[in-house]
Amino acid sequence: MSMLIIADDLSGAADCAIGFASCGLHTVVALDPMSASAEAQVTAADTDTRRLSPAEAAAHTRAAFEALIKPGQRLYKKIDSTLRGNWAAEVAALQPLAGLAIVAPAFPATGRTLQGGRVFVNGEPLESTETWKLENADRPADVAAMLVAAGLQSQLLDIETLRSDPEALAARIVASANSGAQALIVDAHTADDLLHLAQVTAHMDLPLFWVGSGGLAREIAKLPDFFRAAPQGHAAVERAVVADRRAPILIMVGSLSAVSVRQCDLLKQRSEVIELIVPPAVLRPGSSHGDWASWRSRIGATLDAGHDLLLRIGRDEAFDPQEGAHLSNVLAALVEPHFAKVGGLIATGGETARAMLTTVGIGSLQLLCEIEAGVAYGRPIASRHGHCPGVITKAGAFGTEHALYAAWLHLSATVEAH
């Protein structure tokens, strides 16, 4: 058995697929779906559709599925646990091809649960969170309403039904499909809830595919005998990562979430990283800005001196969430001449990670291990110039306050003194 994961951004693809890598499966994240590895047991393809229109996102998602799916392969549509992007339109594009959509965005390890078909973040309704307000204004965070707007008939599977015995749960899922439901929204509060869902749905004859965050994916990865044993080779790659270290580490933070700010603060408190915050006013016009050469020189000088560098995108009154990809691409262009000096890369925010890797010609990562929930570590399979430092990706609003520091420790191959 093998798995195809289709995600709408890079950090999401990695945090979903890392659960499979952690279980010993050969797992690859591909920035270009059309160049995905044919050898991997688990392929996570990033369609980079989060900022597109719903129609464009649906078309890209369908094209990726049709190009990559293999006979007998299972499909997992990765969506953001806080419902960002065009996820409903993408699910609607896949449903006629793949069957009943089992929609379970809960990720209990990161505080995301589903109750009554609505997302809660650490017990708080999603609509009340900074993450939702930043991009969605007054839109309701209603899973069923989003699916209906995308043209899908949905039903809710409540927590009591989910926790029923396997035969009863399987019968309920079949009954939903037979009654015309195209998507089944599953309440889940704990990892055990998601494991029970995975155990029941993995072996059903009913055509279906999973729609979720990294939470459900991790439980599927744990199922015994669902995958064949993984090829050897992870250990050799890991040893090479440690051996090529004491070049400086670059930490790039494009996310402006309060979570990322706290993570940066703790990293600065516990390490000797040098911080540079590039103003958006410099990044918007790019190389035509008068301070462009000066900023590029400062980045190079910091890395030349062997300092680990925390490089952040600033924020000003003109900030627009829609310009995130552009600012990330320009920030990557600032770094590009100095990237060969970097011994390891930590990128917060899918747009930031994609921008840097694409700029230096890294098209895919072999995932190796997880630093903490949602924080994935991997190694480039190849790059344009042959430089393949260890890479850690993290979604901007994910992780504990220690996430960046833990990532930095991992790449530094150091142990904190107690």
Image (cartoon, rainbow, N blue to C red):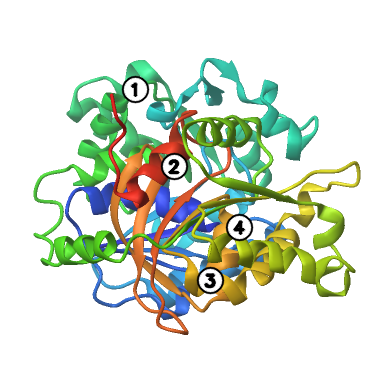
Residue position for label 2: 213
Labels 3 & 1 near each other (Cβ < 8 A): no
Residue position for label 3: 339
Earlier residue among tags 1 and 4: 1
Badge 2 amino acid? Ser
Q: Give the number of the mark in front: 3 or 1.
A: 3
Q: Earlier in the sequence, mark 3 or mark 2?
A: 2
Q: Is residue 325 above or below residue 71?
A: above
Q: Earlier in the sequence, mark 2 or mark 1?
A: 1
Is label 3 in contact with label 2 (beta carbons under 8 Å)? no
Q: Which residue is mark 4?
A: 352
Label 3 with label 4: CB-CB less than 8 Å:
no
| Residue that extends furthest to the bottom in the rendered view of this protein | 385
Question: As displayed, is residue 369 above or below residue 297?
Answer: above
Mark 3 or 4, nearer chain start: 3
Does residue 255 sit above or below 230 in this rendering?
above
| Relative to 96, 28 lies left or right | left
Which residue lies at the image location 41% right of the left edge and 41% below the top edge? 374
Residue 104 rendering spot, x and y as whole percentages: 43, 36
| Distance from the alpha carbon under mark 3 to that under mark 2 | 31 Å
Going from N to C along the chain, the mark reached first, 3 or 1, is 1
| Element on which disc 2 rests | loop
Name which residue type carries label 3.
Phe
Q: Earlier in the sequence, mark 4 or mark 2?
A: 2
